[in-house]
Image (cartoon, grey):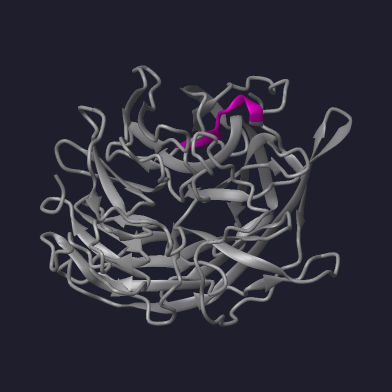
């Protein structure tokens, strides 16, 4: 389909940055969170992300509340790998490994970017320290009451720069901060608001609501926007916004050099780079009830993946679209690709919880594996080990890590218990060490946010 080149990019007023917040709570479950609950569950599963400390775990307890399955220490698992010293109950929204550090961003209202040093022994206990703080609220353009800022994701921009995304509750602008990942100094703040383009003689306005999963490739930032319309409670056509590095100041992005294009589905929630000129876009929303009719030109019904050549970012070429089905796919901070970048691994938010292996060439049929006995849980992270065979490491909100053999793709049995209320994870570049955030570690009496380390070669089946 043809891309759209914007004629205007409206930048909303930048919010103040660098203020230190105090305290933290479990992930947001506010009423305006548009993410749908699964009709297959009795009351619907919890919203995306790490859940409150009341979320049940899978371990057995006796009448005195003592965990009968508790084993400490555990072979191949360091349950005391790292914990944040600035707020014990602050869950992570995203984790990424950049160089020799694990970077993370904590939830509202702490709004803290933190960093954890990885030692020469990747399993050796370390600490996480606060690196940068995003203001807890933004002042709306209409002069109303300040609205909470809620961090979402980290993106490695290379050259020592880190991008952090956050949404402002009840507001359309999508916010990004670019920081130096060694000094943690602010480099640029971007507030992406309404975008206008010409369609013949008509001016069309697109209101991105909100942005998700940016990827940086060849000096361009590609930002997926869900485009959820709260008035209709439906997803409008998905878009990808493209912002180029500023040629006059390569440390910043050129906010006058912007384009956008429509995806072939609704609710795009993740983008990954397949190679140095191709991106992969996950169109997560599938159920027909959430798709306005008629569908847009070239739009594929159901959840799907777009594979797009962005050699010319302002003029992308859609290579093919891969349908997945009438399901809703899980919104996660990152889209998991196999080591050779030939397969995408995604999970369903629709019952039964299912892992899909998607051939990005579009030549081989879709394969899937069900996660059994997981009706009360949702997928919170997917990582891929790089051994032989490759395995998808799928963490669920019940505290269990499920292992999917990506060659056999058989239905998956029992999981390995990690801890209460797991959240995002990150895996080492060699695919051996998984770093998993949890709100309460195995055998611990009280909740306290931490990261545990798992040696996938010894701890997992």
Q: In this view, does 229 lie above or below 11?
A: above
Q: Which residue is drawn at 69% across and 47% down?
A: 208
Q: In this view, does 114 lie above or below 438?
A: below
Seen as rendered, the residue at the extreme front is 63
Numbered circles on residues, count: 0
Q: Give the quadrant of the N terminus.
A: top right
Residue 251 located within the stretch drawn in magenta? no
Q: Nearer the viewer, residue 52 or 248?
A: 52
Q: Is residue 431 above or below residue 18?
A: above
User: Where is residue 431 drawn, in percent x and y?
Assistant: 22, 50
Q: Is 154 situated left or right of 407 in this image?
A: right
Considering the whole magenta stretch, tell me its main secondary structure. strand
Range drawn in magenta: 278-289
User: Where is residue 230 drawn, in percent x and y?
Assistant: 73, 45
Q: Which residue is drawn at 63% across and 52% down?
A: 33
- Asked whether residue 428 is in view, the answer is yes
Seen as rendered, the residue at the extreme right is 201
User: Where is residue 169 drawn, in percent x and y?
Assistant: 68, 60
Q: Which residue is drawn at 20% across and 72% down?
A: 119
Residue 287 located within the stretch drawn in magenta? yes
Q: Which residue is drawn at 21% across and 43% down?
A: 386
């Amino acid at each position: 389909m043809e891309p759209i080149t914007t004629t205007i990019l409206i930048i909303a007023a930048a919010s103040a940055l660098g203020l230190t917040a105090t305290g933290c709570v479990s992930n947001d479950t506010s009423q305006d969170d548009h993410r749908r609950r699964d009709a297959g569950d009795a009351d619907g599963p919890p919203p995306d992300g790490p859940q409150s400390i009341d979320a049940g775990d899978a371990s057995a307890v006796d009448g005195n509340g003592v965990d009968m399955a508790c084993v400490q220490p555990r072979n191949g698992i360091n349950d005391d790998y790292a914990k944040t010293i600035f707020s014990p109950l602050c869950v992570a929204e995203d984790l990424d490994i950049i160089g020799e550090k694990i970077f993370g961003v904590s939830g509202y209202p702490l709004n803290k970017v933190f960093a954890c040093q990885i030692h020469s022994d990747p399993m050796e206990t370390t600490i996480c320290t606060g690196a940068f703080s995003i203001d807890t609220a933004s002042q709306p353009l209409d002069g109303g009451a300040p609205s909470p800022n809620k961090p979402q994701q980290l993106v490695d921009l290379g050259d020592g720069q880190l991008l952090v995304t956050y949404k402002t509750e009840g507001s359309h602008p999508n916010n990004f901060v670019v920081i130096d990942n060694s000094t943690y100094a602010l480099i640029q703040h971007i507030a992406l608001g309404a975008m206008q383009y010409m369609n013949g003689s008509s001016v069309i306005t697109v209101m991105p609501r909100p942005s998700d999963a940016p990827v940086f490739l060849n000096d361009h930032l590609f930002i997926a926007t869900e485009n959820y319309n709260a008035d209709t409670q439906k997803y409008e056509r998905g878009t990808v916004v493209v912002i180029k590095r500023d040629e006059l100041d390569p440390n910043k992005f050129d906010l006058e050099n912007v384009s956008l294009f429509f995806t072939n589905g609704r609710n795009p929630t993740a983008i990954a780079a397949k190679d140095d000129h191709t991106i992969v876009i996950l169109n997560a929303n599938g159920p027909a009830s959430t798709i306005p009719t008629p569908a847009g030109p070239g739009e594929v019904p159901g959840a799907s993946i777009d594979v797009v050549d962005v050699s010319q970012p302002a003029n992308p070429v859609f290579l093919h679209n891969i349908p997945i089905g009438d399901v809703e796919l899980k919104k996660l901070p990152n889209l998991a690709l196999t080591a050779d970048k030939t397969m995408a691994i995604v999970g369903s938010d629709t019952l039964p919880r299912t892992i899909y292996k998607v051939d990005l060439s579009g030549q081989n049929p879709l394969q899937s594996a069900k996660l059994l006995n997981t009706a009360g849980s949702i997928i919170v992270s997917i990582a891929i080990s790089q051994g032989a065979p490759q395995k998808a490491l799928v963490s669920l909100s019940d505290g269990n890590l499920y292992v999917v053999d990506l060659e056999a793709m058989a239905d998956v049995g029992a999981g390995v218990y990690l801890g209460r209320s797991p959240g995002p994870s990150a895996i080492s570049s060699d695919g051996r060490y998984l770093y998993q955030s949890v709100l309460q570690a195995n055998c611990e009496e009280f909740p306290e946010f931490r990261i545990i380390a798992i040696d996938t070669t010894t701890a997992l089946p």
